[in-house]
Image (cartoon, rainbow, N blue to C red):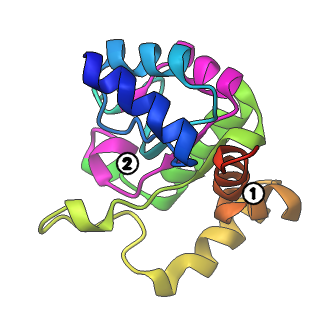
Amino acid sequence: TGFGREAVAEFNRLGIVVDLAHANDAAFYETLALSKKPVEFSHGAVFGLTPHWRCLTDDMLKALAANGGVIGIAVYPGFVAREPENQTLGRFVDHVEYVCDKVGDDHVGFGSDYDGMGDLVPVLPSYAEMPRLTQLLLDRGFSEESVLKFWGGNFLRVMRKAAVGQ
């Protein structure tokens, strides 16, 4: 909408990161075309592994990366896999690996979505288990540098680039 276009421009002016996690496909691409700053997709996953409307296609991942943005892989079971038996932490890491293979480790992070699940048990049930995720990433061959990017470095980069005067 016109208001949406004005909002993107104002967010850019004020140094506010635009979040596309709940945008439809048309709004996603139009926002990327309009934004002069990197954007984020704060909590979702990849369509190539889980065909869910809240997951990004390969073309969307490429467009997000071209913008300098980042996707936060969410622990929401339905984003990680359709089948309950595959809604595991290992499958979560598959999503991280998929993004890295498609667009590089500069464009992936973690975007929990802990507050949006109701009674569902997330694939990483609590913050106390986060060291387990780090170890699994290292066991899969990710470098410590990449893991630090996933744990917040990439989101911090986007916030710095979105800041006023950047």
Residue displayed at 50% across by 51% down: 92
Q: What residue type is labelled 2?
A: Asn
Q: Which amino acid does label 1 sit on?
A: Lys
Residue displayed at 75% across by 55% down: 140
Secondary structure under tag 1 reads helix
Find residue 163 and report its horizontal and vertical position in percent.
66, 51
Q: Quick one: 109 or 79, which is closer to the camera?
A: 109
Residue displayed at 47% across by 40% down: 11
Q: Is residue 124 left or right of residue 62?
A: left
Q: Is-magenta flag for residue 134? A: no
**Whether residue 40 is visible:** no
Secondary structure under tag 2 reads helix
Q: Which circle marks residue 86 in the picture?
A: 2
On the rendered image, what quadrant is the C terminus found in? top right
Q: In which quarter of the image is residue 5?
A: top left
Q: Give the range drawn in magenta.
A: 55-83
**Which residue is disc 1 drawn over?**
149
Q: Is-magenta flag for residue 65? A: yes
Q: Quick one: 150 or 81, which is closer to the camera?
A: 150
Mark before the other along the chain sequence, 2 or 1: 2
